[in-house]
Amino acid sequence: MTDRRVTADEKVLDARHREEWKQRAAWRVMKFQAEFVEGFDAMEAAGLGDAICVYGSARTPVDSPEYKLGVDLGRKLGEAGFSVITGGGPGAMEAANRGAVEAGVKSVGLGIELPFEQGINEFVHIELDFKYFFVRKVMFLKYSCGFCALPGGFGTMDELFEALTLVQTGKVGKFPIALIGSHYWGGLYDWLRDSMLREGKISPPDVDLLTMTDDLDEAVAHMKQAR
């Protein structure tokens, strides 16, 4: 069995490390600060211009239609003048980075420390590795002007609903969000409308914060609204 590495996030969040946290709290806060500063410096120096975050599953096979969809999306975003930011991993993230490279635009991978190594894909020009999820999330949102979600798992859902929450609450301004693939996202969209909305947990305009499409040109056009 492969040894599981304890991550920096776990040391902060897990109650079992509470005593260690108390003893080294000031030092860990300085680590947060250092990771923010390093991230801001690197992203500012990159000169990305308008950039779109593309999220999707790390488990997407290279020979699958979903991988090709990701390549096409990254390329079309690049052709529209957008840099592309992903989590830097394999699968759908690699596909979008690959498409950006094909389009000749900047391809960014914001990696994260995990208990088991994942690594940055080979189609990334600008690579940053983070120890803390919350720092990485700030970088995603600060340096992008829109969000495209390919079929993905918990990580994709996490980023999707964080972006939706920030837009809904007015914490960020215009930030277009597109779900790519109605066959995958249709059930979620229906649940938002038929359960959340119907029971008054969200308002009718909240559903309109999402665009679901199978047309990549429509998705790219939606991203252009951020300009």
Image (tube, rainbow, N blue to C red):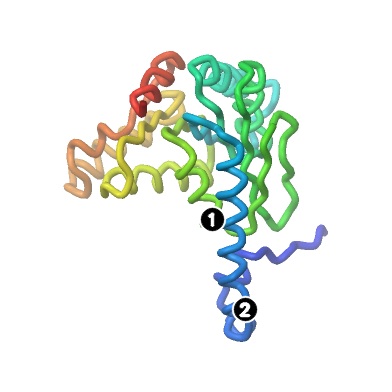
The image shows residue 182, relative to residue 14, as above or below, that is above
Dot 2 surroundings within 10 Å: few (below 14), some, or many (20 or more)? few
Q: Quadrant of the C terminus?
A: top left
Quadrant containing the N terminus in the rendered view: bottom right
Q: Are marks 1 and 2 in contact (CB under 8 Å)?
A: no
- Amino acid type for the residue under numbered disc 2: His
Q: Give me the residue at 64% from left, 18% from top.
A: 104
Q: Point out the frontmost of discs 1 and 2.
A: 1
Q: In which quadrant of the rendered view does residue 147 lie?
A: top left
State the mark number for residue 17: 2
Identify residue for label 1. Answer: 135
The image shows residue 222, relative to residue 16, as above or below, that is: above
Name the side, left or right, on which 5 lies relative to 212: right
Q: Nearer the viewer, residue 148 or 173?
A: 173
Q: CA distance from mark 1 to mark 2?
A: 20 Å
Circle 1 SS class:
helix
The residue shown at (64%, 53%) is: 130
- Structural crowding at the residue carrying mark 1, measured as other residues with C-alpha within 10 Å and reported as few (<14), some (14–19) or many (≥20): some
